[in-house]
Amino acid sequence: MQLMLLSNSTNFGGGYLDHAMEHIRSFLGPAAQLLFVPFALKDREGYAARAAARFAREGVEVHALTEDQEGRRSLEAAEAVFVGGGNTFRLLKTLQDARLLEPLAARARAGMRYLGASAGTNIAAPTIRTTNDMPIVQPDSFDALGLVPFQINPHYLDADAATRHMGETREERLREFLEENARVVVGLREGTWLRLEGARLSLGGAAPARIFRRGQEPREAAPGEALDDLMLG
């Protein structure tokens, strides 16, 4: 499989996908067309137009996936797909309702390049149980694409020692997940991504990732570090 899973699509102070575009272009290779999945936002037309405008600057033509039979045909023919961010519950429910979840997974496993950001990264995991999003809709299940055997938490935030907020930190929430689930969780900080080429998984971007395993203290994975062991489940 060929996967690039971004924590976020926009870095503070930068433009849409600017922080990762050089690496995205390398990932897409010679692909001149990209199928965009806009289902995580309500305004799909506007979202698709934004993606199309950004990739047009790179010489890549964008077409939006639709929920009808034409959408299924476009997915079958796609060289590469980009699943945009937004609300993970809405994204998953729409793919389930349109019966596009399994075809999307099958195409990715067959070699179609899969680019995800935020919610699009969440659904590459076995389930969406480690998303940060509010469940504004109820999908049939939390089961997602399962393209990687570990869970992902995009937009991972470190605890702020100066805050007066007394709610749970992100780390505490992920530790709670591990109390009930044995699956590894990768906390992706802003500006970072995971890239899978065949069996080789690595961390990209300028910040470390935080790896959570049940019964162990979290560890930091450095940018550029090989994470192939995570693909073993």
Image (cartoon, rainbow, N blue to C red):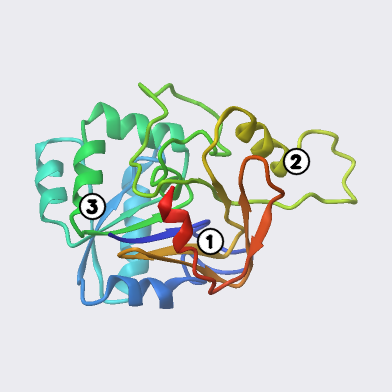
| Residue 17 appears left or right of 211 | left
Q: Position of residue 232 (x, y in %)?
A: 42, 52
Q: What whole-number distance in Å separates the C-alpha atoms at marks 1 and 2?
A: 23 Å
Q: Quadrant of residue 206?
A: bottom right
| Residue 54 appears left or right of 98 | right
Label 1 secondary element = loop
Please state which of residues 106 and 87 is positioned toward the viewer in this rendering. Answer: 106
For the residues labelled 2 and 3, say whether their Cβ atoms are less than 8 Å apart: no
Label 2 secondary element = loop
| Residue 79 appears left or right of 123 | left
The residue wearing badge 1 is 10
Front tag of 1 and 3: 3
Label 3 secondary element = helix
Front tag of 1 and 2: 2
Q: What whole-number distance in Å separates the C-alpha atoms at marks 2 and 3?
A: 35 Å
Q: Position of residue 224 (x, y in %)?
A: 53, 74
Q: Of the residues under marks 1 and 2, which one precedes in the sequence?
A: 1
Q: Point out which mark residue 24 bears.
A: none
Q: What whole-number distance in Å separates the C-alpha atoms at marks 1 and 3?
A: 27 Å
The amino acid marked with disc number 2 is: Thr
Looking at the image, residue 155 lies above or below residue 29: above
The residue wearing badge 3 is 109
Looking at the image, residue 182 lies above or below residue 55: above
Looking at the image, residue 100 lies above or below residue 233: above
Please state which of residues 54 and 138 is positioned toward the viewer in this rendering. Answer: 138
* Residue found at x 57% / y 69%: 14
Please state which of residues 148 and 97 is positioned toward the viewer in this rendering. Answer: 148
Q: Counting other residues with Cα less than 10 Å from the Cα at mark 3, is it few (<14), some (14-19), or many (20 or more)?
A: some
Q: Point out which mark residue 169 bears.
A: 2
Q: Quadrant of residue 179?
A: top right
Q: Position of residue 60 (x, y in %)?
A: 25, 71
Q: Of the residues under marks 1 and 3, which one precedes in the sequence?
A: 1
